[in-house]
Image: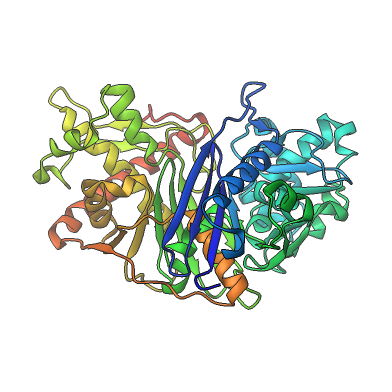
Amino acid sequence: MKQPIYVGLDIGTTAIKISAVTQQLEAVYEMQYAYNYRTPCKGWTEINPDTWVDIVLEGLKELLQHIPAKKIAGIGITGQMHTIVFVDQQGESVRPAILWNDNRTKEAIPMIKQQLQKKEQTAHLSQVVSPGSPLASLLWVKENEPEKYNQIAKILIAKDYVKLKLTGTYTTDYCDASTSSMYNLYTDTWSKEVQQLFDFDPQLFPEIKPASTIVGCLTPNVCEILEIDTKIPVIAGTGDNVAAALVSRSFEENQPLISLGTSGVVVIPDQTHCLKPKGKNVVAKITETDNAIITQGTVQAGAKVNSWWMEKILHTTEYSKEQKQIDDNLLGKNDVQFFPHMNGEKTLFANPMLRGAFVGLGLETTREEMYLAVLEGVAFGIRQLFEAMRNKQQPEYFTIVGGGAQSELWIKIICNVLGYPIKRIVSSQEAVHGAAILAIIGVEGSFSFPDNEYQMVYPKQLLCKSYEDCYQRYIKLVQMFLSAGGAENGRMSDL
């Protein structure tokens, strides 16, 4: 095998991505397959998990028409976190998977939090459990579908079900285990206390493996479907946020990451397993000796507020044109401010009912000022997350990825709001490429990053000072909102 090829799979919420790369991460094949999930009731999101398997098998068959099986050295996998699959003794799904964005357990969350707070060992989980958490979804099935619950032999996260069908093995990784609300972050094991509190059979929980571990090879049945006779190893894999942090070199360089996609995710890596009181602590454990964790928080609306403003309010898709209308002299001097949490907030306020607001509007307010306020509001929300989750050591810079990172104006705003340089990766780097890196590490034992093209954006002292004043004003507005009871009713009307 002169030049081995590694395959990454990404089981996304509405699409599956397949990427084949060299050891230097040069893409030799990439494909994306869209699909839809079901909403059988208001607030419910479900899918037949075999949908993923069918797409992956078809995708691999198509891939193998371009790349011989004997050249593929390994398959890595990542995907949506929290989405839970319920399988029986035969490894078949007993009911549709419940997705991470499902809201059916919204009313039950306060009771679940109360239960978790009863034990010292589980109290920390009460801060992160939310609608769509595997714990909440499993409890819902137990209480509402007892016949289905009694058929469950194992619970798996989305990528782990696909892995089961590819290899016949029942495993998960530390990332997906540690974000399930059923894991002990201090012992790095499934929480016996959670199992006791909610009367869960310990046998329901799969073995936890480091993300780059080879868990098995493609089964004979899968090889027959793919019409190959090569035993291709499959790696344990990890959640999409860890995979994105891995490919962005956040672990290697120990610098924070901003993923400005549909949501705005702030990821703070730490090599010493330091657990933070704010944010979701995620155990990465890429290899057996890896002690890294990431603490992540999310501005749930993220770059979605940009498309909301442009498409639903301005009725245009000319993003670049609208941003060019904003005068640079307005940066840091905008009287209009925007509260960006338009569809709830989990990390800072723990309020799924929170909604956004404009503040400081006057008859003189312009279209450009309102649009700038939208972009600045997300930047302020990102900074507030960072301040709540930061390491003691000052970062050297932030890496930024995602669709929002294509906006030079937005990067400039974020850079000066944070007061740190921003490293914008020019080449495409996504979670699916992180999955491929896991395959390289699993098969070869290590991975060396190639030199990637990037752009550095540096803050300007005067603009930083102006934005510091704006940010402090934003924080005062948020505090007024909270003291007026806004966190309970989801409104900013009392400001």
Q: In this view, does 22 lie above or below 431?
A: below
- Whether residue 68 appears in this view of the structure is yes
Q: Nearer the viewer, residue 411 or 166?
A: 166
- Give me the residue at 18% from left, 28% from top: 367
Q: In this view, does 124 lie to the left or right of 310?
A: right
Above/below status of 318 relative to 377: above
Q: In this view, does 242 lie to the left or right of 255?
A: right
The answer to which of 287 and 193 lies nearer the viewer is 287
Q: In this view, does 315 lie above or below 201?
A: above
Q: Residue 260 at x, y = what percent?
A: 38, 48
Q: Which of 429 and 137 is in front in this view?
A: 429
- Residue 143, quarter of picture: top right
Q: Which percent across, then down, holds residue 222?
A: 73, 50
Q: Quadrant of the N terminus?
A: bottom right
Residue 277 seen in this snapshot:
no
Question: Which residue is drawn at the image coordinates 78% and 42% (left, top)?
Answer: 86
Foreground of the two, 402 or 128: 402
Residue 391 image position (x, y, % from top left): 45, 68
Q: Please provide percent x and percent y for residue 258.
A: 39, 55
Asked whether, in this view, residue 480 is left or right of residue 54, the answer is: left
Quadrant where the C terminus is found in the figure? top left
Q: Residue at x 12, y 42 (%)?
A: 330
Horizontally, is 141 left or right of 408 in the view? right
